[in-house]
Image (cartoon, rainbow, N blue to C red):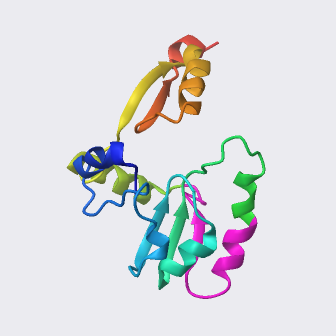
Amino acid sequence: MTNTGNLELVHSIGADHVIDYTHEDFTRGTSRYDLIVDCGGGHPLTAYRRVLTPTGIYIEVGEVGMGKWIEPFTGAVTQPLLSSLGKQQFTGLFPNPLSAEDLTTVRSLLESGKVKPVIDRRYSLEQTSQALRYLETGKVRGKLVVTINQAESAP
């Protein structure tokens, strides 16, 4: 799910089906999903619950309300509550540390090209404030990378 301006980008990184949220509210449709990876919020968890299959999984990766300090904590309460009401699972991304096997799987997906990271811009550690200002514009396409030079930070 993305906006009109990013449809081509999302298709180019391998999505089979892309929903333009500026024209369609998928939580009101008849399609049901085994997995929803939510990178930006925008709907209440009950709406996602409605479109998940009976054993579907919802994973929250990010939150849309950047200025609202309480929002990141609400999932810690509501996700386990909804998970306890049936076989659907609600969780945040990587709730437990990744195992060596998980990291190997991620590496193989990246190396095979099945997962293609999209990097909008790169910043040095000293440019972190610029990166945050750009992030707040809402115009980021992909991820921002802040590089930490370990050689310079060593004592």
- Which percent across, then down, holds residue 37? 47, 62
Q: x, y (%) of residue 140?
A: 46, 34
Image quadrant for the C terminus?
top right
Q: Residue at x 48, y 84 (%)?
A: 55
Q: Residue furthest right?
A: 70
Q: What's the residue at 37%, 56% (across, down)?
A: 20
Report the front residue among 29 and 54: 29
Depth check, front residue: 27 or 130: 27
Residue 146 image position (x, y, % from top left): 51, 26
Q: On the picture, is 133 further left or further right than 121?
A: right
Q: Quadrant of residue 93?
A: bottom right
Q: Is residue 76 left or right of residue 148?
A: right
Q: Is residue 44 left or right of residue 52?
A: right
Vertical side of 68 occupied by 23: above or below: below
> How many numbered marks, from 0 up?
0
Is-magenta flag for residue 3?
no
- The quadrant of the picture occupied by the N terminus is bottom left
Q: Is residue 142 positioned above or below 44 on the image?
A: above
Q: Nearer the viewer, residue 87 or 48?
A: 48
Q: Nearer the viewer, residue 147 or 155?
A: 147
Give the percent coordinates (x, y) of residue 50.
54, 80
The residue at the point 74 percent across, 60 percent down is 74
Residue sitting at x 40%, y 37%:
141
Which portion, as a residue range, is magenta? 77-97
Q: Is residue 117 above or below residue 134?
A: below
